[in-house]
Amino acid sequence: MQLLDCYDRQFCLYFEAFHLKKTPMYIAFMQFMGDEEEATSFSYTLEINGNGRKMTWQGVPRSIRDSHKTVRDSQDGLIITRKLALFFSSDNTNSKELKLKISGRVWREH
């Protein structure tokens, strides 16, 4: 988890591993440090790129009052399999080392 300050508010960026059935997966998502109503006044994008490819997720941050497990279980974020994560990690697709660079942006909706 990483804490970010934007628009005099705080957001949490989560990145975690989990299993969907027996498949190893990763999810990245943002949560707003406040209530759900105020969270809907913001949007965000997360992007992973590597090997000449790019994957982008755009969403509305969930309130921190929703547990990160609830957000993960609803699959409300950028979700990738371990195989795809390794593909984005290096120029060598046989690599077993995960080195993902996730970038993103938060903005206020009008």
Image (cartoon, grey):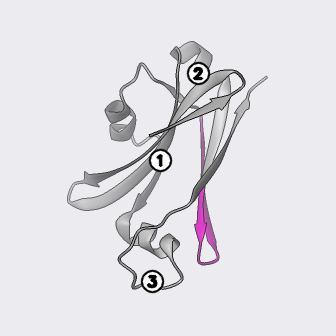
Residue 1 in magenta stretch: no
Q: Quadrant of the N terminus?
A: top left
Tell me the amino acid under the disc marked 2: Ala
Tell me the amino acid under the disc marked 1: Ala
Left or right side of 38 for 88: left
Q: Secondary structure at mark 2?
A: helix
Residue pointed to by mark 3: 93
Q: Earlier in the sequence, mark 2 or mark 1?
A: 1
Tell me the amino acid under the disc marked 3: Thr
The crowd level at tag 3 (other Cα within 10 Å; few <14, some 14-19, many 20+) is some
The magenta segment: 47-59
Left or right side of 66 for 18: left
Residue 4 vs 41, above or below: the answer is below
User: How far is the residue under mark 2 from the one under mark 3?
Assistant: 38 Å
Residue 2 vs 85, above or below: the answer is above
x then y, percent, for residue 22: 20, 60
Left or right side of 27 for 103: right
Residue pointed to by mark 1: 28
**Cβ atoms under marks 2 and 3 closer than 8 Å:** no
Location of residue 60 by image quarter? top right
x then y, percent, for residue 71: 40, 34
At 72% across and 24% down in the image, what residue appears? 7
Residue pointed to by mark 2: 39
